[in-house]
Amino acid sequence: MPIFDYRFTVAAPQTAVSTFHHDTRILKLLTPPPMFVQIHSFEPLGEGSVANFTIWAGPIPLRWQAIHTQVSPSGFTDTQASGPMRFWQHTHRFRALAPNLTEVHEHIEYQYHAGLRGLFTRLLFNKPGLWALFTARKWITRRHVARLVANEAA
């Protein structure tokens, strides 16, 4: 089963990074063009909470349902209950490296469907595609968490 790991740091306390990622509205924000997300329902992030959404890859809709587990201030896991992949489990971890420096670790275990059914997801969710997506998410996270910290300090 393929595994994708991506780590980056954010110049902010772990609590600020965790608060940002626990806000269910950020899924739209963290999805860079040319993709966008349409939220159908998203329960407040908690143990067993469910999210139903569609990721639009250009004109192609990818309907997704995710279940959240291991929810804590240090992260959470979302597992695809139904969607375009044969298997998808994404673990988000936040670790304080210093009082104002947090490491974000994104760990994804995934598996494609065989044949034509999995062709599009092989193109979209391959390692270079995931690297590009999470590089964009790194910059988006840094920018928005910096604003969150600045607003709290004001």
Image (cartoon, rainbow, N blue to C red):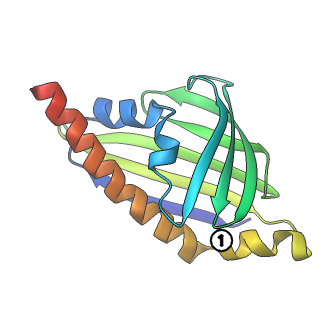
- The quarter holding residue 50 reads top right
Q: Residue at x 46, y 31 (%)?
A: 22
* Coordinates of residue 48 in the picture (x, y in percent): 69, 25
Q: Is residue 32 above or below residue 126?
A: above
Q: Nearer the viewer, residue 2 or 130?
A: 130
Q: Residue at x 38, y 35 (%)?
A: 20
* Coordinates of residue 10 in the picture (x, y in percent): 27, 49
From the viewer's perspective, is 117 left or right of 34? right
Residue occupying the far front of the picture: 59
From the viewer's perspective, is 120 left or right of 39? right
Does the rendering let one see residue 8?
Answer: no
Give the total of numbered labels: 1
The kind of secondary structure element at disc 1 is helix
Q: Residue at x 78, y 54 (%)?
A: 87
Does the rendering let one see residue 144?
Answer: yes
Q: Residues within 10 Å of mark 1 (few under 14, many from 20)?
A: few
Q: Quadrant of the N terminus?
A: bottom right
Label 1, on which residue?
124
Q: Nearer the viewer, residue 75 or 148?
A: 148
* Coordinates of residue 153 in the picture (x, y in percent): 11, 27
- The quarter holding residue 97 reads top left
Residue occupying the far left of the picture: 154
Q: Quadrant of the C terminus?
A: top left
